[in-house]
Amino acid sequence: MILSWPTIILEISSLGIGLLLLILGLVFTSLKSKATLGYFSIIALLLMLVGSFYLPSGATQTFINNFYVQDSLALFFKQLFIVSALLVNTMALRYMKPHTNNRGDFFALTFFALTGMMMMASAAEFITLYIGLELMTFTFVLLTAYKKHDLKSGEAGLKYILLSAVSSGVLLYGFSLLYGLTGALDFSSLVALFAPTSSPLLVWAIVMVLAGLGFKIALVPFHMWTPDVYEGAPTPITAFLAVGSKAAGFVAFIRVFFQVFAVYSPIFMPLLIALTVLTLLIGNLIALAQTHLKRLLAYSSIAHAGYILLGVIAYSKLGLSAILFYLLLYMFANIGAFAAVAALVINTGQDKISDLAGLWKSSPFTSVVLLVSLLSLAGIPPTAGFIGKFYLFTELVSRGYLWLAFVAVGMSLVAIYYYLVVIRTFLSGSVAEKTSMTIPFSLKLVMLVSVVMTIGIGVFPGPFTDYLLKVAQAFLG
Amino acid sequence: MSLLSYIILTPFIGAAMLVLIPEKQTTFIKLVSALFAFIGLALSFYLFLNYDKSLGGMQFVENIPWIKAFAINYKLGADGLSVSMALLTGIIWFAGVLVTWNLQERVKEFFIYMLILVGGVFGVFLSLDLLVLFIFLEIAVIPKFILIHIWGSGKKEYSAMKYTLYLLAGSAFSLIALILIYIHSSTLDVTQLALITYSVPFQKFIFFLLLIGFGVIVPLWPLHRWTPDGHSSAPTAISMLLAGVIMKLGGYALIRVGIGVFPAGAAFWAPLIAVIAVVNCIYIALVAMVQKDLKYVVANSSISHMGYVLIGIAAMNTISLTGAASQMFAHGIMAALFFALVGAIYNKTHTRMLADFGGLAFQMPRAATLFLITGLASLGLPGFFNFVAEFLIFAGAFKVYPVLTTVTILAVVITAIYVLRVVQQMFFGPRNPKWDSLTDLKGIELVPLVFLAVILLWFGLVPSSITNLINQGIDPIVAQIGGAL
């Protein structure tokens, strides 16, 4: 048994800090010190982020034989999770103040979710993957329902846990079939055991795993939970769900479908293509009818799962690096958009699109942030979203899916329409009675970082594409 | 960094500077915008003067690796075609800022979006990498949406959305074409792409996609539906930029990329373009004839005039293409002048309905004179650059499409009818006491109008200074056609 501790140092520190925050929350009971916990969590995350760059990234390291791996793919995702947790916690500093009066557990919970995500990034065995996934999911249920006196928050939590339970059942069913068929659960043994021929039972198992993981990335038809949960959850948590939870779903998806089931790609690919097309169509078309910004962003996040899956369909190194690139820019664009929503909610308590009217006057900065973030999601240059879509579509077309690229580009046009509807609302509107909005410094900082990164990655994509291509090459050999 | 980078960066730096100025200081904001517009004009004029005509070809080339993983470079370069288009942009930008001098509402934002728009336009004309060109093209779209939506008039919400969706739908086609080209050749450098030989079916398919993508911008009938609404709803300066340069982006890209890189594809679709060009010229001219709103007349006249450019492109020979590019320049200035005049008159009368006018020449003789000059330029009277351009187009196109060209020349007659009718309805006839309170155009209102009119006349009298330049840009492209066919 090989125990290479640097492999799990990030998980251990995340878990440790989470527990420490729980204890600190119990020790310091005054209101003021509760807020300090948030600052502590941010500093801890910053240290983890800096530390993560000193971890050996080149060679693949494993922990407990092959059950847990730390390769450059896992490291990239862990850094992505840490950055998203960092931005989310900063966003939550002021946002969660009214909801954390007697409770010190909010920031601790975000660390537990982070630990779960990291485990999913490194898991090389189905049970480990499942534990990471459940740790993340349960924490998210608690975080979603965190606003105790808010019915919508509670409802969202309930919906999330019920539907998660079903999807976990499906996923476990798939795992158990795999175990029954092969007698193994770790990825390297499974790869060695899988023969090119398949049995109906194995296909069924693959479908079950696809459904279970599809739930996490909000793949249609397993997306039903998304709009309600996104709407009910506190806004920073919605951002964390849209960014962190989705990325975690994708890293598991990548490992399972690029690596474990690689032999069976001709079998699952038609199904995946069909679901991707459905996701693109339904996500974008239903978004057209939304009147609330958070629900709109929920449907847009469903649609984006479809775009990202185009990289899986391309099924190549470049396709994989396009996925990673897209997840990166998607994180900053979404965090920017949700930070703007948070600013709106703090000031007006609403997130209706029509409430955005006059934002250009009441907070020019927020309106610029929202503009840039939505343009990035829509894929308009010079934001990063354009390069991301160009990268994905190019790889897709080069693998022969020209028709699919036409579908995706057509749906992008639909997406542009609903983003433009939002954009034109907040860039115009009378402002006679509106006073200027007060936006806490922490929130401004989050917005600034996401806007700078969104435009920065769009204008200088070179270093990112180079690095992510290396990650993809290392993973696919 | 070369001159071209400075030209592209000028508006963007201007926009960044404006961000820093408090929004209350509107005069200062206008002065800074005018200063940057002047720098832009000066730089593009400097480019015009310093382009070495004895050498020809691409000059001021700048090539910086941008995305190494895709082999995409930030590559700029200018030949005669780009230089003339950049000069056009500089001229209209400067005139547009002056026309907007009396803007009161959200001044700072207006100029920021306008500067970003202009930066995108310069970028398209000066970049030599297709992806970079496409990105600049897209950068120009969204500010325009915002400008029409916020500062527009009439059914501006509808027009802004219609314009944007049409243009982005077009972009979707060009994006797919771009991806296919990239996959085929692993580069998007226009000069390198021109050296590669492509199979004819590939060329046909790609050119078709590009024809739709860039054709929406030109605009090509029946993809032109955004134009009348977009032009009419936009604020004056933006109508000027829209008709003056944005529409030219489509024609420019069709010549540079469509014909320059895929001559066999272009040759295949050329008859279709020629037929559409006739529809553009004749049908839209007839549409212009029945408009009741002055701005709709001018907007439809723009589409009709772009039909000449299209038939010039379809004929694909040196004379017709030189004529097409010259027409883009001439029409750019003329349309900007037209819209500037319409805007100036609307500011006084607060109506654009033709039926409301009459006898305005009594109260506004200067406006009437300028309007008549513009109208005469529009119908291609000798002495204006428009005449030279149209003559070149017809001379070049007649050899290839004798019948279609003859039909197109009819459009000149129709143009004369509706332009003169408008002039007569608005300015002549009995004195209308309703307008007695109006003052004629004066001071800063006159500056951009006279500026544009003088340019139109100047190039009409000395056309060779710009046609020779354009010709040098066209020659290598025509050589490309000769090589392919």
Image (cartoon, coloured by chain):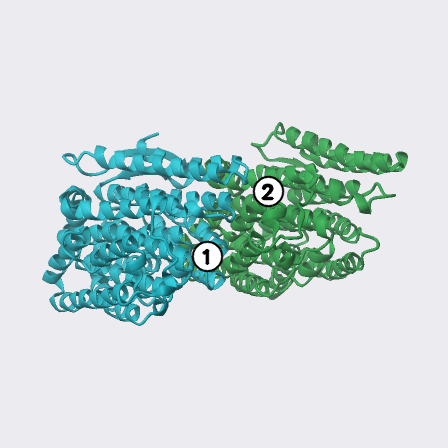
Chain colours: A green, B cyan
In this rendering, would A163 be left or right of A192?
Answer: right
Residue sitting nearer the eye, A167 or A372: A372
Residue sitting nearer the eye, A99 or B351: B351
Q: Mark 2: which amino acid?
A: Phe
Q: Chain of mark 2?
A: A
In this rendering, would B319 be left or right of B356?
Answer: left
Mark 1 or mark 2: which is in front?
Answer: 1
**Residue occupying the point 70% across, 31% down:** A5
How far apart marks 1 and 2 lie (CA) works out to 23 Å
Q: Is residue A396 visible?
A: yes
Q: Chain of mark 1?
A: B
| Residue B299, placed above or below residue A138 | below
| Residue hosting label 1 | B152
- Image x and y of residue B205, in percent: 30, 60
| Residue B141, placed above or below residue B47 | below
In this rendering, would B152 be left or right of A222?
Answer: left
Residue sitting nearer the eye, B3 or A364: A364
Residue sitting nearer the eye, B67 or B164: B164
Q: Mark 1: which amino acid?
A: Gly
Q: Quadrant of the N terminus of chain A?
A: top right
| Residue hosting label 2 | A365
Total labels: the figure holds 2
